[in-house]
Amino acid sequence: MANSILLKDEPCPVARCVNLIGDRWSLLIVRDAFDGMRRFGDFQRSLGVARNILSDRLKKLVDAGVLEMQDASDGTAYQEYVLTAKGESLFPVIVALRQWGEHNLFESGEHYSLLIDKNTGQQIPFMAPVAADGEVLKASDTQVQKVK
């Protein structure tokens, strides 16, 4: 993939990730895929994005192995975009962004969509990085070990 080649020598995982999914449309496509969307037209209606931009982002996500194209599950001639295992592993990223938004971008009492556990019907608990002993880590408890 061309974008991967551009960052081939980039040792920072965050920079590589942002290069792939760091724009608004790519993240929202992945969010919508988690919500069950599969077809180009459904993504376009949900996002209100121009066809050329949506096509570009879907191609980028397919080329990176985040989504794959499959024959439509209903037997029609359409193609569907389905999350791969690599795409499914983005779930904690989407949850972290959602939870940050819930805590920082809504006024007290303002309503927003909820992510619930299908088995319990309860909102999922706040997700936080933890140390090997199970204690929640703050940014000040960590450091990046740079490549030499």
Image (cartoon, rainbow, N blue to C red):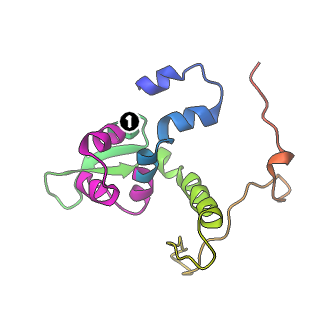
Q: Which quarter of the figure is the C terminus placed in?
A: top right
Secondary element under disc 1, as helix, strand or loop, is helix
Q: Given the image, on which type of amino acid does mark 1 rest? A: Lys
**Residue 44 visible, this orientation:** yes
Give the x, y percent position of residue 60. 38, 36
Query: What crowding class fits label 1: few (fewer than 14 Cα within 10 Å), some (14-19), or many (20 or more)?
Result: some
Residue drawn at (64%, 62%) of the image: 104
**Image position of 94 (left or right of 31):** right
Question: Furthest residue to the left?
Answer: 77
Q: Which residues are magenta?
A: 29-58
Residue drawn at (81%, 58%) of the image: 136
Along the viewing direction, whichever of 85 and 87 lies nearer the viewer: 87
Question: Furthest residue to the front?
Answer: 107
Residue drawn at (48%, 26%) of the image: 4
Badge 1 is on which residue? 60
Query: Quick check: is 43 in the magenta stretch?
Result: yes
Query: Quick check: is 36 in the magenta stretch?
Result: yes
Q: Considering the whole magenta stretch, tell me its main secondary structure.
A: helix
Give the x, y percent position of residue 76. 14, 56
Give the x, y percent position of residue 97. 58, 56
